[in-house]
Image (cartoon, rainbow, N blue to C red):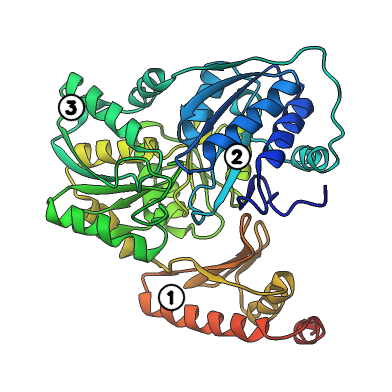
Amino acid sequence: MNKLSCFKTYDVRGVVGTEIDEVIAYRIGRAFAQHLGAGRIVVGSDARLSGESLKKALAEGLMDAGADVIDIGLSGTEEMYFASFFLGMDGGIEVTASHNPIEYNGFKFIGPDARPFGLADEFSAVRKLVETAAFRKVERKGTLSTASILTSYIDHLLRLVDCKRFRPLRLITDSGNGAAGHVVDALEERFKALSVPVDFVKINHEPDGNFPNGVPNPLLPERRAVTSRAVRDHRADMGIAWDGDFDRCFLYDEHGEFVSGYFVSGILAAHFLEKHPSEKIVHDSRLYWNTLDIIRNAKGVPVMSRTGHVFFKDTMRRQDAIYGGEISAHHYFRNFAHCDSGMIPWLLVAEHLSTTGKTLSELVSSRAALFTCSEEVNFEVHDPAGVMACVCETYKAGAKKIDHTDGLGIEFEQWRFSLRLSNTESLLRLNIEARADAKLVAEKLLEIGNLIQKLSELDEKQLTSVRRP
């Protein structure tokens, strides 16, 4: 088998039928179990139409490598994470392509104790096994069983919030016809049993891999209108939308305005440090001035991480941090095996709204008055490293700080920017933030955007010439 294009930085994603099929799924299962020497593996799949057939082939590969497989059925990625550490599994795989277009699918991996898989040489070793099919013979074929972990998972979620502190709230939940709906239903049922005064208004609720309302990706502005309108129409206190495997949640304030993950991370950092002073908080390398200010004022300890769930989880574990947040709406929790969750964040924000008596717009506006940021802007370029080097050469004069934790970060007195290559797509991503100056953010976004577009038109020799002092 030739080199596979579906293997990304730390997970697998590709077009079904051309980049990913049942043969590749089988080999991935066989390679994963062989590499781990695993005895027990949990698998799940989201609502995508190809999920069940790919999961079946994956399970066959795992069993042929001698692993016993537990299938938790239709699930979000975090349910697979939970099943892994709750059931004491040797590893786990979720069949999902998250927010990618409808023709895509893929696989997310974890190792023993829900630890991140894909660091160092692990992921490349599995890829090599998949491509070469150098599989060992095993003495016994593994078994396949099914399990429901939903009740225990809901128990765990509700141990992380104080339901007794909730005031009456009306929440819009937009599952995007992905996998989140059954968890919302289970939480609603539990809230009723506990007399928690939360009213759910559900839209795009039923799982449907045809995605009749569009692929669930609330980071796309065109996907936000329905949730926003529902918040206003129902006079809700907050809107919540998820991507396909609901490991990310996106919030809307009581006016239906989309809330950047930049500010959600700040709210959650403040919430944790109020209860647990002096704890470590892991923050994003792309935009962080707001979060850094909140952490330091609350006497917490800030720790920067490279972007991406594998890197964040590794940093969370090494630092034993209580919480970590990415602007892309991935939020990580020590009490969730340092994994990311799309359910815990909105539960904590709902508790925070209840205890502070403030609206979500009030919480956000007070911070936006101090720090302003752009949304992430993506560029297709043929030589990302060369373009980044030229941008660095252009802006290094007068910079207070130049950081290469993840791509390029350059900081000035009143503004800073981050430029990095995506871990999952062939895109160069730009983020800009400033101190209380939206006009400056807009100016710099246009300025750097124009420079990147100009540089993207140059060949390698011309780029080398530009960045030569």
Q: Give the image location of residue 279, x and y in percent.
A: 48, 35
> Residue tagged by mark 1?
441
Q: Give the image location of residue 122, x and y in percent.
A: 76, 37
Ranked by sequence position, the earlier of labels 2 and 1 is 2
Query: Could you tell me if the residues under marks 2 and 1 are in contact, i.e. CB atoms within 8 Å?
Result: no
The vertical placement of 279 against 306, above or below, is above
Label for residue 196?
Answer: 3
Residue at the spot x=82%, y=84% of the render?
461
Residue at the spot x=54%, y=42% of the render?
50
SS state under label 3: loop
Report the mark closest to the observer, 1 or 3.
Answer: 3
SS state under label 1: helix
* Residue at mark 1 to residue at mark 3: CA–CA distance: 42 Å
Ranked by sequence position, the earlier of labels 1 and 3 is 3
* Residue at mark 2 to residue at mark 3: CA–CA distance: 34 Å
> Residue tagged by mark 2?
108
Residue 42 can be seen in this image: yes
Residue at the spot x=84%, y=36% of the render?
133
Tell me the kind of residue under disc 1.
Answer: Val
Tell me the kind of residue under disc 2.
Answer: Lys
